[in-house]
Image (cartoon, rainbow, N blue to C red):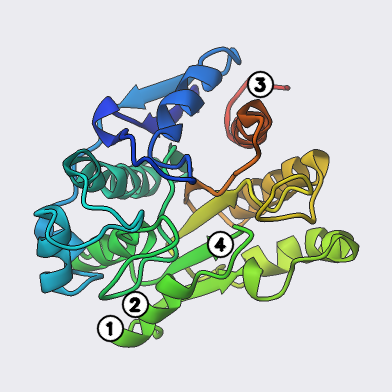
Amino acid sequence: MNSIPVFYSPKLVANAHSYSPSSGKPALVIESWQTLGIPIDIREPTPATEYALCLAHGKTYVQKVLACRADNGFRNRLPEVAASLPYTTGAFVSAAREALNNGKVAVAPVSGFHHACHDNGGEFCTFNGLVVAAQVLKKAGLVNKVGILDFDQHYGNGTVDIIRTRELDDWLLHYSAGAEYEREDQAEDFLKRIPELVNRFNDCDIIHYQAGADPHVADPLGGWLTTAQLAERDRLVFENAKSWHIPIAWNLAGGYQVDFRNVLNIHDNTLKACAKVYLTNVNE
């Protein structure tokens, strides 16, 4: 593999006028990644259709949000945000399709997924791209099983809600570190468990990996992993997925430090770990 496929478009960027930087973050991440000297192949994502979004959410909710007649996950009804949402989810669906296609990896530098429930959004999440992508792949007959590995600081309640509501638990497996980990004294145990956690998905056709930045010790909404430990987390995820020959599509999540350069450094490190595992002739 000579470059990392990255699904990004300015169309998925918006100003949500929110405490969360997630709607505007992809542009900053791409700008930062382009300075690293890592070969990335930026591709235009296909926006998610209303049909695709309704594979994980109620039709009324989807239609009202897109028409700005119901609140999005940022608790507003801004047309700019509504217009970006199909591209945000579509970027992850595109990445999942590409990871299956190349058998290795692809990334969508987007976030705002795992708190989105079946019939409502919240906590800066509107549509659950993790589940939408799984459903799209399943309906297309491309997968039998999908694993969602959620290493955000917070519990993926929206993902759980959709899996339960749609009764997907027989083929859509889910692990959210936020259910178990939140303290600095748990860090080493967590890192030791990562091979086991990835191994839970060894019969899955693909892993959807949320590489959260908010577990960082300095994050105002997180606080238990250092920068080095987050980088080690990502290395272990990628190495173990590769060793099991499981394609992995990954995205970003969280990251609320006031000095946003610190958040970008975390996301830079995830790309570096990915490149070192999957690309030829990349050592840094």
**Residue at 64%, 50% in the rendered image:** 214
Q: Give the CA distance from mark 1 to mark 4.
A: 19 Å
Q: Position of residue 162 (x, y in %)?
A: 34, 77
Which mark is in front, 1 or 3? 1
Q: Give the CA distance from mark 1 to mark 3.
A: 42 Å
Amino acid type shown at disc 1:
Arg
- Secondary structure of the residue carrying tag 3 is loop
Between 53 and 70, the one nearer to me in the picture: 70
Residue at numbered disc 2: 162
Would you say the residues marked 2 and 1 are in contact, meaning their CB atoms lie under 8 Å apart?
Answer: yes
Amino acid type shown at disc 3:
Val
Would you say the residues marked 2 and 4 are in contact, meaning their CB atoms lie under 8 Å apart?
Answer: no
Q: Is residue 49 visible?
A: yes
Residue at numbered disc 3: 282
229 lies above or below 206: above
Residue at numbered disc 4: 150
Residue at numbered disc 1: 166
**Residue at 27%, 60% in the rendered image:** 137
Left or right relative to 141: residue 207: right
